[in-house]
Structure formats: structure tokens, C-alpha cells
Image (tube, rainbow, N blue to C red):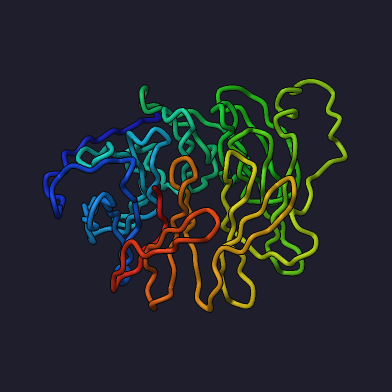
Amino acid sequence: MNKTIIIKILCLSIFLINGCSFASNKAILAEQKIGDFSRIVLINTTSSPSFKFITDLKAVSVKPKWSPNKKNFAFISERNNKKNLWISNDEGSELEIANYNNREVERFEWAPNSEEIAIEFKPNADEANIFLYSLNLKNFLPITRPDKVANLGSWSPDSKWIVFNINDSIYLSNPKGVNEIFITKGSNPKWSPNGEYLIFNRTEKQNKSIWIYKDIDKVVDNTGKENNKNNYFGENIDINHVINSIEYAWAFGGNKILYINDLENNKEIYMMDVKSKKIERLTNNKVDESNIVWSERYRSILFTSNAHNNSDIYQMKPDGSSQEIILSSKDNFSFLDW
């Protein structure tokens, strides 16, 4: 019998500096790596940085993400060789674990409505490995087929569709329905906030190029009807330059793509306008940048840089100007969310 286990814990032993109230719209979630372990840290940016340690170093806690409405956040924590999904309120003072049949979590994505989470579990032979979890109902609903291993992509902006890939093929599925639509070949698909595009990876000459699939909203609207895009499989975002990237994000509602290009072992941040295909290089140095994420309303870009031998946290304006360090530490920070 399938069981959903919800354990609520009041976090009374969280270490806190400079008070106990955090404004979620001005707080950074980060994964802080210390040796072989990592913990989730809530960083207050309203004044001199102050910390709230959400987890301790008795576990490996990774990939923290805010819900779109900033009322909750979630992360994956591994303890005793088991990876579970934890969900917290915005201050990290009340947490619950969402466990389905004791299966291990690989990754997750918040729905834009902040009421559901798509969760990718470690595959087994008898069940689907991507499920829909409802925060209100506390239940799980299978999305993918049990005979296929799927990798989670992202949500449509209306929270009605999920994009994922099976092997090197990209599919759409309506989580509460039965449709499964093949789109194109590729991996790591991300739906644009305006609903019009998908971006995804394809491997070309050992590089991870970025491709775009246009008018994905029309494919959704014409579900069950004749598809006039049968011969369209997407297009390379830049045929004139070599791109090797597995980290990218939509910007300005879907009009621009922010990405990290990893060429000659040097990761730099770029931005491309979807329509004009104009490319701007936002960082220029001999060290690596990573973990790019936007602030609300696309006012600033948050990222980590190894400029001082550690992955410190920086921010800059969308044109690459006004770069400034937010937090420097002897430890490394990764997987940021703002």
C-alpha cells in the first residue's frame, strides 16, 4: 500500500546571527559546501549579511529553491544514504518531509502556482519516477510511465504542463491528464515565462549547444489536432559561435536567455536576445562563474565566482555592470536562489 509520510518539525536548534526575522524577498538561499558535507543557508541581504543555518553538517543538503510566491522553499537532504525532499516556510522555522514509499529524490521543480511540486525519484522497476506532489492535499500523483526512466525539466507558466526528457527525447505531459507529446531531441528543457519557447541542450562535437523550440504554446493549444510543426525540431540559438553550456535561465519574461559558456575551461556569463540574436558578454576574466539566478523583476543577477579561490557570492546589473561581492567566505557556496 502506498503511503505518504509527512513529518513536521519545529526547528528549535537553528543557529541564527543578527535576529530571527528574514524578509524572503530579500533573502538568498544557498548551498554551503564544507568538505564532504553541505548545508542550506538563508542569507539576509537587507544589511550586513547575516545567516540562518537551516540544516546542520550531519547530512548533505543541496539544491534549495524558493517557491514562486516566496512563502516556502524546498531542498534535498541526504542522511543515512537516503535523499528526501524537505519543504519549509519562508523563515526556515517549520519543516516537513515529503516521502513517497521511502523512495530517493533526485530533483524537483516548483509549479508556478506554488501549490505543487514535480518530483523526480530514483527509478525502480514497478513505478513511474516523476510524480506530482500537492502541498495542500499531501498526496502524490504519477506523471510518467512506469516502463520509462524520465528526467525532469520544468513547468509551463500556467502550471498545466511539465516538460521532461526520456533518453535524448523531450516530451510534454499534463500532470493531471494522460497526454504525452513528443517534441524534439534534446535534454534539460526549460519553458519560457511567456509560454512561447523551450530551450534545451543538444550535444554537437562534444559541446553542449543551446537550442530553442519556438511556438511551443501553439503545440499545447493544438493538442489532439493536426500538428503543422511535424517537420520542426528546433534551432540552434547561435550558429555563428561555439557554445558549451549546461547552465542557462530565461530572462525578461522569455525575451532573453542568460547562460554560462564553458570554453577552454573558462566559464563566463552571457546574455542573448531571442529575437535579434544579439549576444552580450557580462563577465570577462580567467576564473569560473556559475550558479546564475535572477532577482525578482530581473533587476539583478546573482552568481558565484572563483575570483578569490572560493565560490563567493556576487551580484550585478543585467548589462554586467555594478558587479559587487555580497558574501566572501573560506567555504564554497553553490546552487543559489533569490
Q: Residue at x 41, y 47 (%)?
A: 104
Q: Quadrant of the N terminus?
A: top left
In percent of width and height, residue 142 lies at 52, 31
Location of residue 69 in the rendering, given as x and y in whole percent from the top left corner = 39, 32
Which quadrant of the structure image shows residue 198? top right
Residue 153 appears in the rendering? yes
**Picture coordinates of residue 70, whole percent (x, y):** 36, 36
In this view, 33 is above or below 108: below
Residue at 75% in and 29% down: 219
Quarter assignment of residue 245: bottom right
Relative to residue 192, is residue 57 drawn left or right? left
Foreground of the two, 114 or 101: 114
- Outermost residue, front side: 322
What residue is rendered at 37% in x and 22% in y?
137
Total count of labels: 0
Query: Is 233 situated above or below 172?
Result: below
Of residues 19 and 75, the one nearer the viewer is 19
Residue 108 in the image: above or below residue 177? below
Q: Residue 185, relative to residue 225: is it above or below?
A: below
Residue 42, can we see it?
Answer: no
What percent of the width, then of the height, locates residue 335? Answer: 42, 56
Q: Quadrant of residue 23?
A: top left
Residue 75 shown left or right of residue 208 in the figure: left
